[in-house]
Image: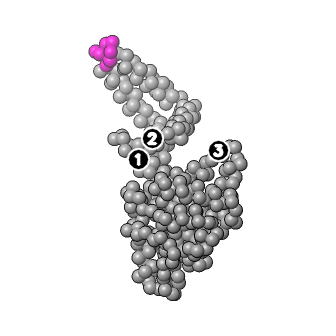
Amino acid sequence: MSDINNKRLEKQWARDERVTRLHAAHPDLAALDKEQKKLVARLVREAIKDPDLVPGLDQRYQDILTQKEALLAKYGISSDVYQPDWDCPICQDRGMTKDGRPCLCRQKDLRARRYREAGLPDNAGDMRFESFDVSLYTPETDAADKVNRLKTFVSKLAQGVPMGNVVLRADIGRGKTHLALATAQAALDCGLSVAYVRADQLMENLRNDLYDDASSGRVMHRVKSCDLLVIDDLGRESVSEFVITQLTDLIEDRNASRRSWFINTNLKGQEIADRYGARLSDRIFEKATFFFLERKGSIRRLKGSNEVDMV
């Protein structure tokens, strides 16, 4: 809430400076504002001490308002000069409406923040389910079914239903990154927190995180705690004991806490096992649905995987 409070204070300070300049330019308005301020304080006091004086004071207050309106009209100044320039006039930048509900502006701010923190590439906006061309795949109905199942996967995640995980296998240029980004953005639009990262960049970030005292494990905490983790192009990173240890820790933790992940890769099932060893490959296979994308050819499931139904 501190960012909201700071924003409101900045708006109010800007208003105060604007009114100060107004008073310097128009002393007659300054005199009326000063009298109005004193009158408000006196009205509060007399309402308790001597209520009989209140009607006369209230009449004087109305007279001041009338005089101010006339002067503002004379100088061509809007009465809005006395109000902060709120970004959202509905909630006055509080983020909450009067009935205690999150304001639409706050929802937009939170959505924008989720997108900033997700780590999506600059071209992600074009990568949506709606722009995924299923006609490039044969049979087309099989590709369309995969897209629909991924939509359901996201929808149920947003409802709090544990949905397991997804491994999307395809050769280079077959659209796996498109579907990964489409899934990530659909999740963000549903209000879920998402971490999207290439496998090689993830390992570099984790390595820096490990040796940076100022970071204090923020990267690992982020990829472990987000609602949906999307790892792009598993197999792109150089394999080492560090990589296998970090990936195993990450996948085991997310599996145990039933937080879903989405991995796309060029690797086949046996290649995953050979590259990362039995322990990590078992953790990947045990709670994942495997998809295989192929253009202008038959679509087949990745053999040797423990496939589970998502829907």
**Disc 3 to disc 1, how far (Cα)?**
34 Å
The numbered mark at residue 103 is: 1
Q: Is residue 53 magenta?
A: yes
Q: Which residue is mark 2?
A: 94
**Disc 2 to disc 1, how far (Cα)?**
8 Å
Q: Position of residue 50 (x, y in %)?
A: 31, 13
Q: Earlier in the sequence, mark 3 or mark 1?
A: 1
Q: Name the amino acid type tagged 2.
A: Arg
Residue at the front extreme? Answer: 278
Q: Which residue is mark 3?
A: 216
Residue at image location 39% in from the left, 31% down from the top: 65
Residue at the bottom extreme? Answer: 297
Query: Depth check: 249 or 113 in front?
Result: 249
Q: Nearer the viewer, mark 3 or mark 1?
A: 3
Residue at image location 59% in from the left, 78% down from the top: 171
Residue at image location 53% in from the left, 54% down from the top: 253
Q: Is residue 133 visible?
A: no
Q: Is residue 143 visible?
A: yes
Q: Is residue 94 magenta?
A: no
Residue stretch rendered in magenta on the structure? 47-54
**Image quarter (top left, top right, bottom left or bottom right) of the C terminus:** bottom left
Q: Position of residue 278 (x, y in %)?
A: 59, 65
